[in-house]
Image (tube, rainbow, N blue to C red):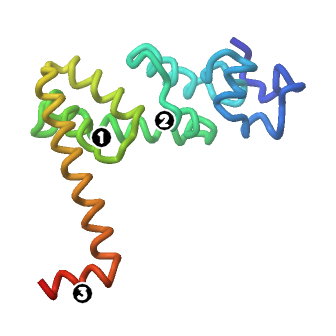
Amino acid sequence: MPENTNICQKPEHLIGKPQDCSPEQIRKCHGTEHDHVCISEQEKRILMQMQEILGFIPGPLVVMSKREGLLSNFMTYGKCLFEGGPLNDRERFLIALSAATALKSRNCIQSHYKRALNAGATKDEVLQSMLIAGMISNTSTLHIAYDATDSLDDKAEAL
């Protein structure tokens, strides 16, 4: 792994500044996002931990790692929310899975699915939480669309 010198190891592939590299460009030049020269050692450790835990590195974490301290602060915030409190791990990760499903966040769905199973959730509980989230997110979309159109409001009042 190259030292964090902020000097691009493959400048022939560089389009802008090293910190502006896309995840695809980083993989092309360095193999993995956590090997990129513009990422601090602490951020590299976090990305490598996510790779070990999830089997992949979520793209938003790569984006956050490009701003010094942002990724570590985000992870600290998340750790505070996911540890302790009145809910157990299984319940917290089922809720997180539901939110990720409602928000249509593929990486978060994959992450919280694995974490919910590891925390003891059954596949039936996972399915139920995703179905509920899908139903809620679908109807909220319709509610927003309904409220945004004056003509539908007039038609509803006529009924």
Residue identified by numbered label 3: 154
- Tell me the quadrant of the picture where the N terminus can be found: top right
Under mark 1, the amino acid is Thr
Q: How many marks?
A: 3
Amino acid found under the numbered disc labelled 2? Ser
Residue 123, relative to residue 6: is it above or below? above
Answer with the quarter of the image where residue 24 lies: top right
Q: Is residue 157 above or below residue 101?
A: below
Q: Dot 2 corresponds to which residue?
A: 72
Badge 2: how crowded within 10 Å, few (<14), some, or many (20+)? some
Q: Give the image location of residue 49, x and y in percent.
A: 45, 18
What kind of element bears circle 3? helix
**Which dot marks residue 101?**
1
Pinpoint residue 68: horizontal percent, then vertical percent. 61, 39
Compare marks 3 and 1 and give the one earlier in the sequence: 1
Q: Quadrant of residue 77?
A: top left
In the picture provided, is 55 more to the left or to the right than 96? right
Kindly report the distance in space between the C-alpha atoms of the residues bearing marks 1 and 2. Answer: 25 Å
- From the viewer's perspective, tell me whether residue 68 is left or right of residue 129: right
